[in-house]
Image (cartoon, helix red, strand yellow):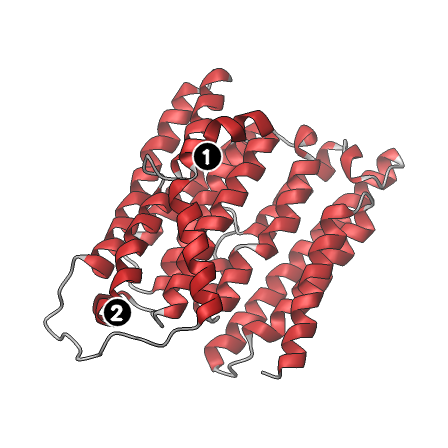
């Protein structure tokens, strides 16, 4: 793709995200979401492969439906209350429609079917954008309307997301589908605490972006798309394959790594809200995610396949990308000791 075109699409993504997260009016928020959708479509379909075109078409149809519901929800609320302010969403029907719309945008269960298919049809760099920056505007809208949403509905969707994200990731062999189901599972953790402590949702999202960016960039630098390819990647980049084990364990939420921090805080908050059974269910469901992260880590670092390749170790690497991966990996592993400072901030 032309570098100028890439720059235009990247700028449009930043513009759309900024418009949505800084707006107070529903129409401006909707405009930002539309700019984001139109900017990412060429990046999904840039390879001209039939799978990529299919992914772009699915993404467009799903996002168009979700944007229509966002606009319908805000218009219904304005019709009944006279308010276009995002934080003044008070009409029950509007709240229900908005919850469905944002769930479709994010890929929460039961509206998750499009996300693994779209991610599978995209490149790893586009998949990184779909899993991180494009989830920020909908998460921000949920944050701003959190006081008006139905806690029972969100809790149900969150538990289902954690369960289905874990179950459906178990038997996958494609790396991008595994990361898609991982994203659905993490969205469940973000959603379950939204009504009770919205700041924890944002903290969880930021740390998830940090860890999943590390995994996507690591896999992209190793040119890995399948578990079978991952088994032979250690001959080319042994140190990167070894350190990816810790990054994956952090994404699974094992102590003493960074990924344990949001899970610990969410379980603590749920217990304080007298929702100990829910906290226990979420903790047990996270074991499903741990299993497929372990599977990926096992393929990357411990398995010695019978068809070992004769690749020499790479001596020439992309310096800026390597530096970014090194910084992100360090943050993905070592942020837990500074948790008291994070407590002070939130």
Q: Is residue 154 left or right of residue 10?
A: left
Residue in view at x 54 percent, y 54 percent: 132
Residue in view at x 53 percent, y 43 percent: 205
Image quadrant occupied by the C terminus: top right
**Alpha carbon distance from label 1 to label 2:** 31 Å
> Count the marks: how many?
2
Name the disc covering residue 262, or none: 1
Question: Does 79 sit above or below residue 112?
Answer: above
Circle 1 Cα neighbour tier, 10 Å, few/some/many (<14 / 14–19 / ≥20): many
**Camera-side residue of 85 and 267:** 267
First in sequence: mark 1 or mark 2? 2
Residue in view at x 59 percent, y 29 percent: 345
| Residue 294 percent coordinates (x, y) | 25, 49
**Does residue 68 appear in the picture of this structure?**
no
Question: Does 298 sit above or below residue 343?
Answer: below
Image quadrant occupied by the N terminus: bottom right
Question: Does 266 sit above or below residue 117?
Answer: above
Circle 2 Cα neighbour tier, 10 Å, few/some/many (<14 / 14–19 / ≥20): many
Q: Which picture quadrant has residue 232?
A: bottom left
From the image, tell me which residue sits under label 2: 233
Q: Which picture quadrant has residue 290?
A: top left
Q: Residue furthest left?
A: 306
| Residue 25 percent coordinates (x, y) | 83, 45
Q: Is residue 102 left or right of residue 124?
A: right
Give the structural element (helix, strand or loop) at label 1: helix
Give the structural element (helix, strand or loop) at label 2: helix
């Amino acid at each position: 793709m032309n570098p100028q075109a890439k720059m235009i699409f990247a700028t449009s993504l930043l513009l759309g995200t900024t418009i949505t997260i800084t707006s107070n009016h529903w129409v401006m928020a909707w405009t930002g979401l539309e700019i984001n959708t139109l900017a990412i479509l060429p990046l999904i379909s840039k390879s001209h492969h039939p799978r990529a075109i299919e992914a772009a078409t699915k993404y467009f149809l799903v996002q168009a439906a979700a944007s229509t519901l966002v606009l319908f929800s805000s218009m219904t609320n304005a019709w009944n209350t006279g308010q276009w302010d995002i934080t003044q969403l008070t009409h029950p029907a509007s709240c229900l429609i908005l919850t469905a719309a944002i769930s479709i945008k994010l890929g929460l269960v039961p509206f998750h079917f499009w996300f693994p298919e779209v991610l599978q049809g995209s490149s790893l760099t586009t998949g990184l954008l779909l899993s991180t920056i494009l989830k920020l505007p909908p998460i921000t809208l949920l944050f701003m309307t959190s006081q008006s949403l139905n806690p029972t509905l969100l809790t149900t969707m969150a538990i289902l997301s954690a369960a289905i994200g874990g179950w459906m990731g178990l038997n996958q062999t494609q790396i991008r589908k595994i990361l898609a189901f991982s994203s659905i599972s993490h969205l469940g953790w973000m959603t379950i605490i939204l009504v009770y402590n919205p700041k924890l949702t944002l903290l969880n999202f930021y740390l998830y972006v940090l860890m999943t960016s590390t995994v996507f960039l690591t896999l992209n630098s190793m040119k890995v798309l399948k578990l079978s390819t991952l088994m032979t990647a250690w001959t080319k980049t042994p140190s990167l394959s070894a350190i990816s084990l810790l990054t994956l364990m952090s994404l699974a939420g094992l102590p003493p790594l960074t990924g344990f921090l949001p899970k610990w805080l969410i379980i603590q908050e749920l217990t304080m809200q007298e929702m100990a059974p829910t906290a226990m269910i979420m903790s047990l469901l996270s074991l499903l995610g741990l299993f497929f992260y372990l599977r990926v880590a096992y393929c990357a670092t411990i398995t010695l396949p019978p068809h070992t390749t004769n690749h020499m170790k790479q001596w020439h690497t992309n310096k800026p990308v390597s530096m970014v991966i090194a910084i992100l990996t360090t943050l993905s592993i070592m942020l837990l000791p500074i948790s008291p400072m994070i407590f002070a901030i939130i």
